[in-house]
Image (tube, rainbow, N blue to C red):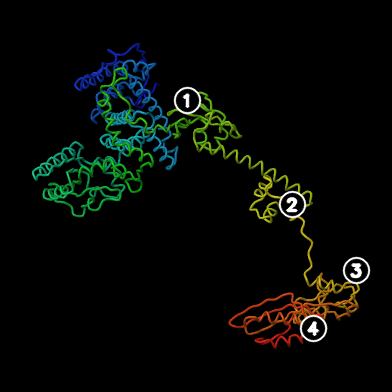
Amino acid sequence: MKTGLADGVSSTAPIVQLAGGAGEGPEPAAANEADAAQLELAVLTRARAFAEPLLATAQLDTGENALAHADGLAAILQAIGAAPSMCAAAYLVYAGDYLSRPEDVIAKAFGESYASLVTHTRKLVQAQRNAREAMDEGALDAAQQAAQIERVRKMLLAFSRDLRVVLLRLASRLQTLRWHAASKQPCPKALARESAQVFAPLANRLGIWQIKWEIEDLAFRFLQPGEYQRIARLQGEKRVEREEEVEAARRRLEAVLNAAGLRALVQGRPKHLYSIWKKMQGKQLAFDEVLDARALRVIVDDVAACYAALGRVQQLWRTVPEAFDDYIARPKPNGYQSLHTVALDERSRAIEIQIRTAQMHEHAESGVAAHWAYKEAGARGYAGVSAGGDFEDQVAQARKAVLRQLLAWEREVVAEPQGTGSAGTGAGEGLFDDRIYVFTPQASIIELPTGATPVDFAYTLHTDLGHRCRGARVDGAMAPLNTPLQSGQTVEVVAAKEGGPSLDWLNSELGYLRSTRARTKVRAWFNALAQRQTIARGREAVEKILQREGRTAVKLEDLASQLGFRTADALFEVVGKDEFSLRNIENLLRPPEPQPDADELLTQRLSRGPRGDATPRGGVLVVGVESLLTQLARCCKPAPPDTIGGYVTRGKGVAVHRASCANFRQMARRTSERVIPVAWGSPRVGESAVYPADVIVEAADRQGLLRDLSELFAKEKMNVVGVQTRSLKGSAWMSFTVEVADSARLQAVLVSVCRIDGVRSARRR
């Protein structure tokens, strides 16, 4: 079956090749507007005649006749104000599906602009069909569906440089839905869902309200027939009847305002069924609580006229006080201004009435408070329909200009030379030139920068797939990896099971990468590769040191932690970069020999001779074991002629304590077997020994106190080797460590210390 431009066309229509144009070829340039209008009608007539033999016997896959579909599409375009030449395009794009070289034939007969329109529309139809397959509810989760829907919406505007393509697709989709409704043929769920989620919001954002509401109602009818019938029964009226009643109310209000001298434009609309149901769902309302099923909009000259018009409305009908909102005095956060009220007509049916100035209306329709911008704003809107971020920002900025050009494109360029045709350039040219949209084999839409390559495509899908990319099929044919992709193409990546990117990809002159994101990922891969190589070199160097030192059992993570690194790889990296000396590791693996403290050195000096023999010559004499290592206890610091005692320690020889030392007495009670008798030995002739002793002085704090005490010790020829002082609230506590040969002489010195001015006490610790 051969697919066509709506939703598929069977091969019942012949494919023909026209050698020349249809009819008389391109028209001459128009001399005036009247001639231009006649030329437009002539183009429409000739285009239908051109398409009729190709479409008359063709059938779409829905069962609708192709020519009837094109007729319906042209009628929809005409109803929304499109020029006749735009309606002519509806026939040409369908006829192109049955020509072997449609671009050449249509360009020769009608001009390059129509040929471009045919080409772009045909590509877009195929892209839509591929995308619809991925829109199936079972294929994607909710978040993926939302992202896919928004990409389809973007694609419809960005797919070509001519927004006429989008308008043709909107009208074609509406005609397809109309045919299903009229013929009572089942409408495919995927097509109805795509209509509701893509085409209706797009028509809304472009401001084509007539197409928007009709697509919404028809899609609602096919997707939720039960709910549709329920709302229709509750409404209790046919749409035509509702429209007639709204029109009658509009004329009556307009007459009242004009009679009061108020120049006003009154617009009316009945609320369509889907909008009623959506509001009931979104705001949890009963049907009777939907007060704007019928609505009137009053546009006046100034703010004073707004309030004057409100007064006339209140005189004409009974209003609902609780339904009044003054958004002129208190604008909405987005700047929206208008008076809203609800009136009850003679049959007590509610009519919502909005009153605003022309400037307020312009802001509401095309500014930041445009109807679609806040009605579709996520959770704040109705039924969870959400707008799409930067896409809306772009459309909002260009929206007014696009709409005016879109529906009047032919009139603005009617004097264009014949050779280019009368279709003119696209209204949306340049708006989305920086993006393209391509498909995966599973029909997912991928957004890429213009000029992107299959490598960019692979990295957009998955980083690992990009690394392993070795080739690509574009529309089923193998293509070089630096081939620039075009919107609508289907791309399949050929990947190796493992491997990494090529350095050539980073060469901008070779054109492999267009996306900054993909280029960053390639650089990151090579940076990671270099880091892995550096770590491997560092690890090898560290392991060699461990082998040389015989410490292979050391855990590498523990070694790194001891050297101040969070992980072993961090250590290996700096070693591999030669930023960390291996001598630091060697020093850690070779712990320094333990150094004896000052007391041990003093004890060894006193207990051993100058030649290192074991005979004590002027220090402590251990009775019965003269060669035994001894050390003076630091807790009491004994000195001759103190009464002393010895305590055998574990691994440090004999500790010599003063007999009055509290620590010594406690150890003697606990392990008396370790206590041994010791005595002071006599120094050899010509040798003298000194011992450290701690002196505690308490005094009234004053200036020069430390100096006076130091001078006294110097006068008594006592070497002070340590001082600690502390002052608090006028009192001073001082600790002196002095070297003495005889503790008895120290007691005499302490008596002299007590005579110093301010000293309260002086004692040996």
Q: Secondary structure at mark 3?
A: loop
Label ID, residue 302? none
Q: Nearer the viewer, mark 3 or mark 2?
A: 3
Compared with 703, 288 (above or below) is above
Q: Which residue is mark 2?
A: 583
**Residue type of the residue flagged with mark 2:** Arg
- Which quadrant holds the N terminus? top left
Q: Which residue is mark 3?
A: 611
Q: Position of residue 67 (x, y in %)?
A: 29, 21
| Residue at figure coordinates x 65%, y 86% from the top left | 758
Quadrant housing residue 754: bottom right
Mark toward the start of the polypeptide (2 vs 1): 1
Residue nearer the viewer, 596 or 111: 596
**Residue type of the residue flagged with mark 4:** Ser
Mark toward the start of the polypeptide (1 vs 4): 1
Q: Nearer the viewer, mark 1 or mark 4?
A: 4
Compared with 578, 562 (above or below) is below
Mark toward the start of the polypeptide (3 vs 2): 2
Asked whether residue 325 is in view, the answer is: no
- Compared across the picture, whether 174 is left or right of 351 comes to right
Q: Which residue is mark 4?
A: 743
Neighbor class of circle 2 (other Cα within 10 Å; few <14, some 14-19, many 20+) is: few
Mark toward the start of the polypeptide (2 vs 4): 2
